Image (cartoon, rainbow, N blue to C red):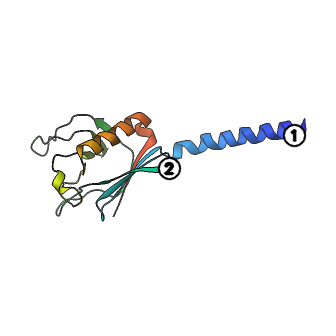
Amino acid sequence: MKTIISALAGVILAGLACVVATPASANVVARVDLSSQRMSVSVNGWTRYNWAVSTARRGYRTPVGSYRPQRMYRSYFSKKYYNSPMPHSIFFRGGYAIHGTNYMGQLGRPASHGCIRLAPGNAATLYSLVQSYGKGNSRIVITR
């Protein structure tokens, strides 16, 4: 009887540890490295994608830090920059977003006003992942 109670207590404690650990972690993590102009996307701790991006060109900046997605739009147009299309936008800090771009030749080098640009298909994939797992279970980490 003592063994059964000990085993049950162990299972309950393990379950509580999982519940306590879950909110601090993220199921989808998009890591952007400004120096290499690359984004890696992990799902449940496993790297699934590695893509070229374009971030802020000279005179502009892409904020560094760790963020949760704030707003998401399948179709969005920049009010600040000539109504430019920003498909599959994931806004993470004010007006800064990860989004698709038609300027594919600029991926892999700084070219934006501060947003993180991806190939349209890659932006759609990331958007779908964040939508599936939820904004609260997703994180965007930007480093120099």
Asked if the residue under mark 2 is in contact with the one under mark 1, i.e. CB atoms within 8 Å, the reply is no
**Label 2, on which residue?**
45
Residue 14 position, x and y percent, is 69, 43
Say if 132 sits above or below 55 in the image.
above
Mark positioned earlier in the residue sequence (1 or 2): 1
The quadrant of the picture occupied by the N terminus is top right
Q: Amino acid at mark 1?
A: Thr
Which residue corresponds to the image point at 20% horizontal and 41% vertical from the top-left? 86
Residue extending farthest to the right is: 1
Q: Nearer the viewer, residue 24 or 105?
A: 105
Under circle 1, the secondary element is: helix
Residue 51 position, x and y percent, is 31, 53
- Per the rendering, the mark at residue 56 is none
Under circle 2, the secondary element is: loop
Which residue corresponds to the image point at 30% horizontal and 56% vertical from the top-left? 63
Say if 125 sits above or below 59 in the image.
above
Say if 75 sits above or below 81 in the image.
above
Bin the neighbour count of mark 1 within 10 Å (Cα to Cα): few under 14, some 14-19, many 20 and up. Answer: few
Q: How many marks?
A: 2
**Label 1, on which residue?**
3
The quadrant of the picture occupied by the C terminus is bottom left
Residue 71 position, x and y percent, is 31, 37
Bin the neighbour count of mark 2 within 10 Å (Cα to Cα): few under 14, some 14-19, many 20 and up. Answer: few
Q: CA distance from mark 1 to mark 2?
A: 34 Å
Which residue corresponds to the image point at 29% horizontal and 45% vertical from the top-left? 122
Q: Amino acid at mark 2?
A: Gly
Which residue corresponds to the image point at 48% horizontal and 45% vertical from the top-left? 26
Q: Quadrant of residue 28?
A: top left
Report the side of 24 relative to 96 (left or right): right
Report the side of 83 relative to 54 (left or right): left
Residue 37 position, x and y percent, is 28, 60
Q: Nearer the viewer, residue 63 or 101?
A: 101
